[in-house]
Amino acid sequence: MAQAKNRGRFVWQELMTDDTAAASAFYSKLLGWHVHASGGDPAYTEFHVGAKGVAGMMKMPDDAKSMGAKAMWMPYITVDEVDPAVKEIEGLGGKVIRPANDIPHVGRFAVVSDPQGAVLAVFKPNGPPASASATAQPGEFSWMELATTDHEAAITFYSKVFGWEAMHRHDMGPMGTYLIFGSEGMQRGGMFKMGPHQGLHPYWLPYAAVADADASAKVVTASGGHVINGPMDVPDGGRIAQLTDPGGVLFAVHTPAKPKAQPAAKPAAPAQTAAPPPPKPTGAAPPAPKAALTPPTLKPAAPPDRPKAAPKPVATPAAAPLAAKKAPAKKKSPAKKKSPAKKKVKKAPPKKKATKKATRKLAAKARSGKLRKDKSKKDKKKSKKDKKKARRKK
């Protein structure tokens, strides 16, 4: 029963490369790994975090090169028994690359490929594998990711061989579905359908935990590697960066999310929003950018409120100019009324002066008329007097 519980666990990562010296220097700087020679095989190098071994490295075999194999990282996954597992893999459409072999004092293993072509090793340790820590420490592996041509066919294959089950499926829009798998209630990794730009052959990509993915990305470029994607956010709140080492081998680093579960658990709403996104990083280049929109859509929920508040200040300034325009109009209107009044008052005197002149003229005219009348009267009186005198003389 104890062995059955160990089935389907990622217990070791192995790097096959052409330049082991360059790889040792690179990963030591990037992850703080310590290089140790293997006691069983002098050509095999081990990488340790403190006293714990986490990975191994060997030079790419010539026979593997002749078969078209390329430098790569390869995961070791536990099975109950290696030989029956190899037969089952062949029966399900997989291939055997290296038949089952024993590693003295370590265990038994075989190198195989799944039906889509991703390479891995099935492994049964001589003793129980070391217990996996709940949270990966810096330098330890925190996530595994399969880029494949058919993730639904892949989960069917791996569920039969390792007992994995699909735990979550996340719709990434045009990039397809990101499937998170696991066993015994624990998430083990993710898989997705790779795009044509990601290479011709499916592959397993390991993620190592680091304290700061952004700082690690700078170390990559300074140490002869290349950052091919990221750093970028993932749904659980962490950050990842995908890279190639100096030998061109794909690798990835992951900064786990800071513990935010406690504050998120207190309010009911955050607890519900935190449930849909996976607690583990998506890691994949294609799904990760889409998966990062889910948390931002929750966080940017605050920014949308700001834009809503913003229109109010915008409206007030808009109304202010209108009010300002109306106010001057009121001031100008009384000014117009007063100005005409002032003009009339000023113009009134000239009119009065004009009337005086007119009256003077009229008076003069009148006087001339009176004089004429007076003359006519005088003439009449004279004529009367003359008539009287004439009568008297007679």
Image: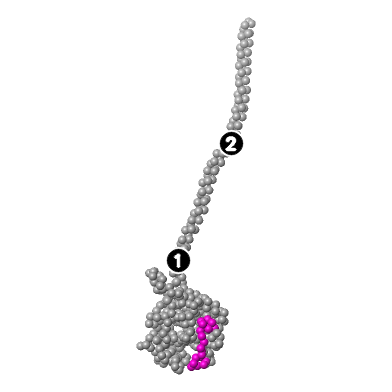
> Which of the pair 175/302 is nearer the observer?
302
Q: Earlier in the sequence, mark 1 or mark 2?
A: 1
Residue at left offset 46%, top offset 93%: 103
Give the residue number, with chain letter if any, for mark 2.
347
Residue at left offset 62%, top offset 20%: 371
Give the residue number, with chain letter if any, for mark 1.
302
Q: Is residue 72 magenta?
A: no
The amino acid at mark 1 is Ala
Residue 76 position within the rendered picture, expressed as x and y whole percent measured from the top left: 45, 87
Quadrant where the N terminus is found in the figure: bottom left
Q: Tell me if residue 260 comes above or below residue 79 in the rendering.
A: above
The amino acid at mark 2 is Lys
> Which of the pair 286/361 is nearer the observer?
286
Residue at left offset 52%, top offset 53%: 321
Left or right, 124 with respect to 392, comes to left
Quadrant where the C terminus is found in the figure: top right
Circle 1 or circle 2, nearest the eye: 1
Residue 66 position within the rendered picture, expressed as x and y whole percent measured from the top left: 53, 91
> What range is drawn magenta here?
26-45
